[in-house]
Image: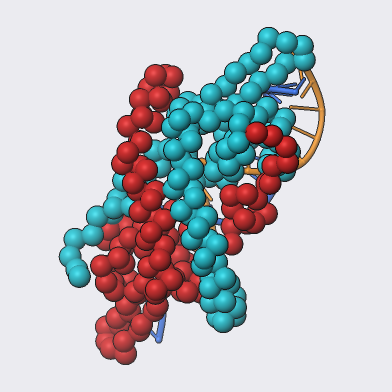
Chain colours: A red, B cyan, C orange, D blue
Amino acid sequence: MSEPLDPDMFTGCDTAPLIRIGDKWTAKIIACLRDGPRRFSELQVPLRGVTPKVLTESLRAMHRDGLVTRTAYEEVPPRVEYALTQLGRSLLEPMAACCAWSRRHLPAVQAAREASGL
Amino acid sequence: MSEPLDPDMFTGCDTAPLIRIGDKWTAKIIACLRDGPRRFSELQVPLRGVTPKVLTESLRAMHRDGLVTRTAYEEVPPRVEYALTQLGRSLLEPMAACCAWSRRHLPAVQAAREASGL
DNA sequence: CAGCATCCTTGATGATACTG
DNA sequence: CAGTATCATCAAGGATGCTG
């Protein structure tokens, strides 16, 4: 009920998050790769509005962290496919937990927000 | 294995997140309130470095969304206690799922990151 | 097609000082 | 104590144009 609270009890680290997940695109990219490999341009479609620069940055970080694989085919025009690794796939579980919460409780959040006049 | 990808398959909304959770403090605040009500200044300690301004903003948003209650006692000096609502408490579940993932897989992320030379 | 290179905007956050 | 009020900062993200 009281006493010492651990500042890092949730994130497990001081300030900078160790892994890039809570940013704007990583989770969406993982969702888009759920059903199989996708090409760079295939990802741009569902992630409407993402610029190639940002998409590249995100994919590079995810590749560096072992979440996705990158396969470049020596063709013209070039073709590059991204796919989830086992590690990346394992993130679908906590993501599903968040989605489940969202489906169940977002209406309550909406209600609370309106009840307090924005 | 292919075809139309839903841009909002993960977040459930277009751009702006409907609820403020993925920010820097909300999840930590929820964790700090897990074992009971806390005062404003009690929260500042474990959330080391958080300025009163930012803590106020976070708590206000959480209150607006029905995640926490705010109880001000008419005393001198003033005392204000924040506590999780049932809704706020329900967020502990998906948070636990994320923590579980972290405990299990962060070492693999570290390894992957080193194996790729940062 | 799959990106780089550049420049720019913006919101979340921080530092500091002050108040009921 | 529990904030409020300003100002400053910085990195994520975006816009645009170019290239192998």
- Above or below for B35 versus A78: above
Q: Quadrant of the N terminus of chain A?
A: top right
- Above or below for A4 versus B65: below
Quick one: which residue is furthest to the left in this view?
B3
Counting labels gives 0
Q: From the viewer's perspective, is B118 left or right of A90? A: right
Quick one: which residue is furthest to the bottom in this view?
A74
Q: From the viewer's perspective, is B22 left or right of B28? A: left
Residue A38 on image: x %, y %: 28, 72
**Residue A60, can we see it?**
no
Residue A32 on image: x %, y %: 30, 62
Residue shown at 44% from the left, 48% from the top: B94
Near-viewer residue (B105 or A20): B105
Residue A43 on image: x %, y %: 30, 65
Residue shown at 32% from the left, 57% from the top: A47
Q: From the viewer's perspective, is A49 left or right of B66? A: left
Q: Quadrant of the C terminus of chain A?
A: top left
- Above or below for B111 versus B66: below
Near-viewer residue (B115 or D7): B115
**Residue A40, can we see it?**
yes
Residue shown at 31% from the left, 67% from the top: A33
Residue shown at 42% from the left, 56% from the top: A94
User: In which quadrant of the rendered view does residue B106 lie?
Assistant: bottom right
User: In which quadrant of the rendered view does residue C1 lie?
Assistant: bottom left
Near-viewer residue (C2 or B36): B36
Quick one: which residue is furthest to the front in this view?
A1
Residue A76 on image: x %, y %: 27, 87
Q: From the viewer's perspective, is A18 left or right of B94? A: right
- Above or below for A80 versus B48: below
